[in-house]
């Protein structure tokens, strides 16, 4: 997933991932997005590109999602970072440690 994110973000001039934490069911990222891009467009590009590549690599997802082209949930959370950038970046790193200790549900 990290390589996919890097590739799609590289295509958007000026966008940069400062910190990322990739979990099984979600991703935390601290990014720089220049004003020429709408945040929703950047997130849309990331979701569209990664979903396409994931569906191609894991064909069995078609059965799980009943032939829908769904990989990501439709929602996302975005917040701007001001003076607390260092604190938020540390939080993103910390999330991986917290999430890795949680019990996993086996289906």
Image: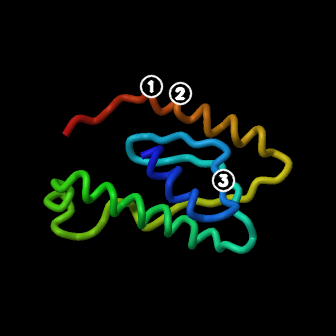
Callouts 1 and 3 close, C-beta under 8 Å: no
Tag in front: 3 or 2: 3
Badge 2 crowding class, 10 Å Cα cut-off, few under 14, some 14 to 19, many 20 or more, is few
106 relative to 28, above or below: above
Callouts 1 and 2 close, C-beta under 8 Å: yes
Quadrant placement of the C terminus: top left
Left or right for 94, reference 83: left
Using the numbered discs, state the Cα–Cα distance from disc 3 to disc 2 in whole angstroms. Answer: 23 Å
Residue wearing tag 1: 101
Secondary structure of the residue carrying tag 1 is loop
Name the spot of residue 21 as percent of width and height, x first. Answer: 54, 40
Q: Residue at x 53, y 50 (%)?
A: 6
Name the spot of residue 58 as percent of width and height, x first. Answer: 22, 52
77 relative to 97, above or below: below
Q: Residue at x 75, y 71 (%)?
A: 35
Which numbered dot is residue 22?
none
Residue wearing tag 3: 16
Q: Earlier in the sequence, mark 3 or mark 2?
A: 3
Name the spot of residue 32 as percent of width and height, x first. Answer: 71, 56
Which residue occupies the foreground of this view, 15 or 68?
15
Residue wearing tag 2: 97
Using the numbered discs, state the Cα–Cα distance from disc 1 to disc 3 in whole angstroms. Answer: 29 Å
Q: Residue at x 69, y 40 (%)?
A: 89
């Amino acid at each position: 997933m990290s390589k996919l994110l890097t590739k799609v973000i590289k295509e958007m001039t000026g966008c940069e991932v400062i910190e990322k934490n990739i979990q099984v069911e979600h991703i935390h990222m601290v990014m720089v997005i220049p004003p020429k891009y709408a945040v929703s467009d950047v997130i849309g590009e990331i979701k569209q590109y990664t979903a396409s590549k994931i569906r191609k690599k894991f064909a069995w997802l078609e059965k799980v999602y009943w032939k829908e082209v769904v990989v990501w949930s439709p929602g996302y959370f975005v917040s701007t970072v001001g003076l607390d950038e260092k604190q938020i970046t540390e939080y993103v790193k910390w999330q991986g440690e917290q999430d890795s200790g949680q019990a996993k549900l086996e289906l």
